[in-house]
Image (cartoon, grey):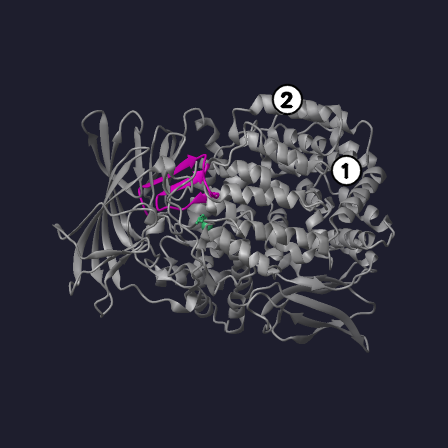
């Protein structure tokens, strides 16, 4: 149903330079909720104190709400007016007052899933970034911090569990089967960290004893029947708490830490103080329903939200332009945590793969923005791969520049200095400078300039002395035509291929100039170069290496990331040449993959990553004009060739029994991942028995990793087994929403000529709903990432996505806006596709009453 209270489109641009400190502070707030699914009555008592000198009225933001009553210091107050959806209260020359406001909301009608909303009979909140103003009138800006007291009352049968931030200090029975609870959070916080949950929930309880010996009660709250699927999340939570103490010296600061899992949620999870709210997808896991990747996702997101308790909550953001201050840093922290829990090398490969898949294209397109943007229309559109993942890379570079000890000193300084404050990115960089004793003046450009820097590298020799000539450039991006050189920490090594001996040990070079010569040393012969080891900087390196050199590095480099990179580059060069019509020699790729497979027993997860071909999208990113059909054809052809040439190796991997699904050790996960890759190669080679082998694996699987991998392989093909497996899967899991999402997803991923038509059919399936963001992402998100299907030449894919955006926008503008960017990549395609993509953006923009969210994304995408 349509959410009538959604904000109408009003493209007002907010500029970072316009920041002014708040005119009024709000040290204390008391909220009283009379809960009901269709009607919740809210009374907010705001204790306000004048901060500025002037007589400014109190500006309270609102969205889709009206004041039912307004009192100042207990007296009815008439000196107020509405300005758009905001409330201005004139308090005369008062310097302090208690302003009481009553509002009424309808959580069941809240399809935006922002503010207080109903999900499956329970009530929950999402306030970041600007959802609190949909509950009550409030300054709703992150630099206004308050101590919260929350009283809620509701029907005991419908809402037996009543939760909010902090500690429950009192509870009792009311009249007519109602009951109440009073929660107090001693830590001042911005409104975006407020949370409330009321529902019929069960709990998995545990506890954690902090470094200083304080006992913290832990609870993960879920719907009845789901409690057995919360153990992995609980272990991840306890491991995160311990890791943050050991690595950052950060202890938890309340006696209680609760997590609630909700099915209808716009993103992954939310770090509300002491009461994290999660998408069920990142809490629920058991071997029968969750893949190894799902398990890793649970661990990573639980850690991410927990780490926000310091990087985000204790030290929060001054304004939303500083979003990367908490998000980039927290992603860096969760990446480091996951690296410590499993294989650091594989985690780094995964993180870089994600950066290249999601962030590099964003940085090269119409929506490119610096990690600290200069302006926005709708802040929800800025929860991007740039803010999160590039933001994390920028923190990582500072950690690299400082080294572990100084980085720890600098983060201690940052946390201690800004504890309880709303800080800026500049505060963080200054703490890095002071703690690390280095000058980061030039490094600050990473916060200012959008676009992925490119390094053009050539190897030069003069009288036996070898050096690198490095030219760096940052491409023009919207609003930023001219760029300055960046400070780039680049890890290098050089090897003598003949002797197998190292010619230049791992070295950190700091680039700062547009053109720079980096001396390497005296070598007898041309060395093999290992560049950007560990992906020390988020840049694109252009350096021509012969297949022989790449093949040598793929097996002999001592840095696992560089080995992965070398093999991927070799594959990429081969594929890009093939797409351009140059049939090169496949032998170096086949030999390098074969040699890499020799290491399968020792490190199966790494090998699985390394031997997997680069994605179609990443191949497209290397081309001037993306040719989706040729890319699919050539990638399948190379996959088929590797399948044929190494048939025995793939079969050998599949012949061994799979590790039991309950074994979640890195080794077992690695073996399962490699078996999935092996099966895909066998199928791509067109082996006659491949569908049967895949179906056998599907049927015999004792867990979701193997089952889903086999189903995905079958979904690409056209066998009888395909239909059979899809049907079995559907019948078995039709009542499990998270698993049913996978059923939609594998079909949208299918590399088949009829996928766009299949997605159109699936959109009409009885189990498809626009009301659940997970389901929308499972079908349309997967489809938009299926390059050849989405870019089908007749434009059917573009039409499908635009139809979705138009249908979803009135209900859930935030999720609708997230579906727009794939249409914005039109510049990368041929003229016919460009015209079709732009026509869909024009059609979206012509919709009456379009949200601010979609308006911003579609108009910027169209402008290019
Ligand atoms: N901070 C939240 C994201 C909120 C998104 C609001 N549109 C989750 C996270 O990054 O941890
Ligand atoms: Zn976050």
The image quarter containing residue 208 is top left
Q: Position of residue 45 (x, y in %)?
A: 21, 49
Q: Which mark is residue 499?
A: none
Task: Determine whether, in the image, residue 108 is placed left or right of residue 640.
Answer: left
Tell me the magenta residue range.
253-279
Residue ID at (53%, 54%): 857
User: Tag 1's secondary structure?
Assistant: helix
Residue in the foreground of this view, choosing between 86 and 481: 86
- Rendered view: 479 above or below 808: below
Residue ID at (77%, 34%): 683
Q: Which mark is residue 681?
A: 1
Residue 265 part of the magenta segment: yes
Instruction: Please tell me which of labels 1 and 2 falls first in the chain.
Output: 1
Query: In what quadrant of the picture does the N terminus appear?
Result: top left
Residue in the foreground of this view, choosing between 343 and 160: 160
Residue in the foreground of this view, choosing between 418 and 20: 20
Residue ID at (41%, 64%): 424
């Amino acid at each position: 149903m349509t959410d009538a209270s959604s904000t109408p489109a009003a493209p007002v641009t907010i500029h970072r330079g316009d920041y002014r400190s708040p005119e009024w502070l709000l040290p204390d707030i008391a909220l009283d909720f009379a809960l009901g699914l269709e009607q919740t009555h809210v009374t907010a008592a705001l204790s306000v104190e004048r901060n500025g000198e002037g007589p400014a009225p109190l500006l309270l933001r609102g969205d889709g709400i009206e004041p039912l009553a307004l009192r100042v210091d207990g007296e009815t107050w008439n000196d107020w007016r509405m300005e758009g959806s905001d409330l201005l209260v004139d308090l005369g020359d008062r310097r302090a007052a208690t302003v009481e406001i009553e509002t009424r909301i309808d959580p069941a009608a809240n399809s935006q899933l922002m503010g207080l909303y109903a999900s499956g009979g329970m009530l929950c909140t999402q306030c970041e970034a600007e959802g609190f103003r949909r509950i009550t009138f409030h300054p709703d800006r992150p630099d206004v911090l308050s101590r919260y007291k929350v009283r809620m009352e509701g029907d005991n049968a419908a809402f037996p569990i009543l939760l909010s931030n902090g500690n429950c200090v009192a509870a009792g029975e009311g009249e007519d089967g109602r009951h109440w609870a009073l929660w107090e959070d001693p830590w001042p916080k911005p409104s975006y960290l407020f949370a409330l949950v009321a529902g019929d929930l069960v709990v998995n309880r545990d506890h954690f004893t902090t470094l200083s010996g304080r006992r913290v009660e832990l609870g993960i709250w879920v719907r009845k029947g789901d409690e057995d699927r919360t153990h992995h999340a609980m272990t991840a939570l306890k491991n995160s708490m311990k890791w943050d103490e050991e690595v950052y010296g950060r202890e938890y600061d309340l006696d209680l830490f609760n997590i609630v899992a909700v099915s209808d949620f716009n993103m992954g999870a939310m770090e509300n103080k002491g009461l994290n709210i999660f998408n069920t997808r990142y809490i629920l896991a058991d071997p029968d329903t969750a893949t190894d990747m799902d398990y890793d996702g649970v661990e990573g997101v639980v850690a991410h939200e927990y780490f926000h308790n310091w990087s985000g909550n204790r030290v929060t953001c001054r304004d939303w332009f500083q979003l990367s201050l908490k998000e980039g840093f927290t992603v860096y922290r969760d990446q480091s945590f996951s690296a410590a829990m499993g294989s650091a090398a594989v985690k780094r490969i995964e993180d870089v793969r994600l950066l290249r898949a999601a962030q590099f294209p964003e940085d090269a397109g119409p929506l490119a923005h610096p990690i600290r943007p200069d302006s926005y229309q709708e802040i929800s559109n800025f929860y991007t791969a740039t803010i999160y993942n590039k933001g994390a890379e920028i923190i990582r570079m500072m950690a690299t520049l400082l080294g572990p000890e100084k980085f720890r000193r600098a983060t201690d300084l940052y946390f201690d200095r800004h504890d309880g404050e709303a800080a800026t990115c500049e505060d963080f960089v200054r703490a890095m400078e002071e703690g690390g004793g280095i000058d980061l003046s030039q490094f600050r450009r990473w916060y200012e300039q959008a676009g992925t820097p490119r390094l053009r590298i050539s190897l030069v020799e003069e009288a036996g002395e070898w050096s690198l000539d490095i030219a760096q450039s940052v491409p023009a991006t919207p609003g930023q035509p001219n760029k300055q050189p960046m400070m780039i920490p680049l890890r290098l090594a050089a090897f003598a291929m003949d002797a197998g001996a190292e010619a230049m040990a791992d070295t950190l070079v700091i680039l700062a100039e547009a053109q720079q010569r980096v001396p390497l040393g005296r070598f007898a012969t041309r060395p093999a170069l290992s560049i950007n080891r560990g992906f020390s900087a988020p840049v694109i390196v252009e350096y021509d290496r012969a297949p022989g050199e790449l093949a040598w590095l793929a097996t002999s480099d001592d840095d696992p990331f560089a080995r992965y990179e070398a093999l991927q580059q070799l594959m990429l060069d081969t594929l890009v040449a093939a797409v351009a019509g140059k049939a090169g020699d496949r032998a170096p790729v086949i030999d390098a993959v074969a040699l890499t497979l020799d290491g399968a027993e020792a490190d199966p997860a790494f090998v699985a990553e390394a031997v997997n071909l680069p994605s179609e999208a990443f191949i497209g990113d290397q081309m001037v004009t993306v040719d989706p059909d040729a890319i699919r054809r050539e990638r399948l052809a190379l996959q088929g060739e590797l399948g044929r040439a190494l048939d025995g190796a793939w079969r050998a991997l599949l012949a061994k029994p799979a590790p039991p699904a309950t074994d979640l050790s890195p080794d077992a996960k690695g073996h399962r991942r490699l078996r999935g890759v092996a099966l895909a190669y066998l199928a791509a080679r067109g082996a006659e028995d491949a569908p049967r082998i895949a179906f056998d694996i599907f049927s015999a699987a004792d867990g979701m990793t193997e089952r889903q991998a086999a189903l995905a392989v079958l979904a690409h093909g056209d066998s009888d087994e395909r239909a059979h497996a899809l049907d079995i899967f559907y019948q078995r899991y039709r009542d499990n929403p998270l698993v049913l999402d996978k059923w939609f997803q594998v079909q949208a991923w299918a590399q088949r000529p009829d996928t766009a038509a299949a997605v159109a059919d699936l959109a009409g399936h009885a189990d498809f709903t626009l009301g659940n963001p997970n389901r929308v992402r499972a079908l349309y998100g997967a489809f938009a990432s299926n390059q050849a299907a989405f870019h089908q030449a007749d434009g059917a894919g573009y039409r499908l996505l635009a139809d979705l955006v138009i249908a979803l926008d009135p209900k859930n503008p935030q999720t609708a806006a997230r579906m727009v960017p794939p249409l914005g990549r039109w510049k990368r395609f041929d003229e016919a596709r460009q015209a079709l993509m732009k026509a869909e953006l024009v059609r979206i923009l012509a919709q009456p009453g379009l949200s601010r969210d979609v308006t911003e994304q579609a108009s910027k995408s169209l402008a290019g």
